Image (cartoon, rainbow, N blue to C red):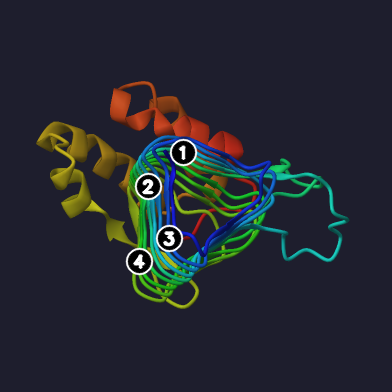
């Protein structure tokens, strides 16, 4: 049977797999669906049209699925969708989407979300990310796979952070961060490649050299942004590890940190 502490309040309409465990004083609303082997700690609130996958661990005092912090919101049935194998630590806040956005906030699989992280409405977070304590995303932010956000990083609305990118402690991301790039500073600027992260994810020296070549095009050759983008797009098909630049530039709307 579902392992529910007797002090937890679970709406009868909520759908919980029989292997889900729920801690003391947790509150779960009527439109919530939770899949197998997910462990929910005490004093958690899960509300809204929220779907949570399998094998997640949600720690105490998390707030998931509350309405977006958007004054235009009018109680539309927007969604929060969380994938599988995520760790979600204390005092995190994930909001549902808005009808003026994509209608849902999405978190993928195998993410490590530390304490006090905020994910605003209509954000899309990929897989295998790490968000250190107090990292916060404004609305409509897109985070790629294997991204690492340093503690207290702040990401402006509609920004994109590409795959394998990294932000330093207290980085203020106000424009898009290309794949593989490290961003640092109150108004974040490029601070080299996330080379150590690439090595840890088993990129070969040849692959890292290819990525460095595109980094130099964007930041070291004195080209305008338009010129650098065109040159990178022309070279992006030359190696599999460079393909992500094509998708990144096709989605980028706020400009790139320079």
- Side (left or right) of 140 relative to 168: right
Q: N-terminal of the two: label 3 or label 4?
A: 3
The relative height of residue 9 versus residue 180 in the rendered view (above or below) is below
Label 4 secondary element: loop
Label 1 secondary element: loop
Foreground pick, 134 / 210:
134
Tell me where residue 75 appears, x and y as whole percent.
84, 54
Q: Can you identify the residue that label 2 sits on? A: 86
Mark nearer the viewer, 1 or 3: 3
Extreme-left residue of the structure: 205
| Residue at left offset 36%, top offset 48% | 111
Q: Quadrant of residue 159?
A: bottom right
Q: Quadrant of residue 191?
A: bottom left
Q: Can you identify the residue that label 4 sits on? A: 132
Mark nearer the viewer, 1 or 4: 1
Tell me where residue 89 appears, x and y as whole percent.
39, 63
Q: Can you identify the residue that label 1 sits on? A: 83
- In 3D space, how far apart are the residues under numbered discs 3 and 4 (Cα atoms)? 24 Å
| Residue at left offset 43%, top offset 60% | 23
Label 3 secondary element: loop
Q: Is residue 148 in sight in this rendering?
A: no
| Residue at left offset 36%, top offset 49% | 129
């Amino acid at each position: 049977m579902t392992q529910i502490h007797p002090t937890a309040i679970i709406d009868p309409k909520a759908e919980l797999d029989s292997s889900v465990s729920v801690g003391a004083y947790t509150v779960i609303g009527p439109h919530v669906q939770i899949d197998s082997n997910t462990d929910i700690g005490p004093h958690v609130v899960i509300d809204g049209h929220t779907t949570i996958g399998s094998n997640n661990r949600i720690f105490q005092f998390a707030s998931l699925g509350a309405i977006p912090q958007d004054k235009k919101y009018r109680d539309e049935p927007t969604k929060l969708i969380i994938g599988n194998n995520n760790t979600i630590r204390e005092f995190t806040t994930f909001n549902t989407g808005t009808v003026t956005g994509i209608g849902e906030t999405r978190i993928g699989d195998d993410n490590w979300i530390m304490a006090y992280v905020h994910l605003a409405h209509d954000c899309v977070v990929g897989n295998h990310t790490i968000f250190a304590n107090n990292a916060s995303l404004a609305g409509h932010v897109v985070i790629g796979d294997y991204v690492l956000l340093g503690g207290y990083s702040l990401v402006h609305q509609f920004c994109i952070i590409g795959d394998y990118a990294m932000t330093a402690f207290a980085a203020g991301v106000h424009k898009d961060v290309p794949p593989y790039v490290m961003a640092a500073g109150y108004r974040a600027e490029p601070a080299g490649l996330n080379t150590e992260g690439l090595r840890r994810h088993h990129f070969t020296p040849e692959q890292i050299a290819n990525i460095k070549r595109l980094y130099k095009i964007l930041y070291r050759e004195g080209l305008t942004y338009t010129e650098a983008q065109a040159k990178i797009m022309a070279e992006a098909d030359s190696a599999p590890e460079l393909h992500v630049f094509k998708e990144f530039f096709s989605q980028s709307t706020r400009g790139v940190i320079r």
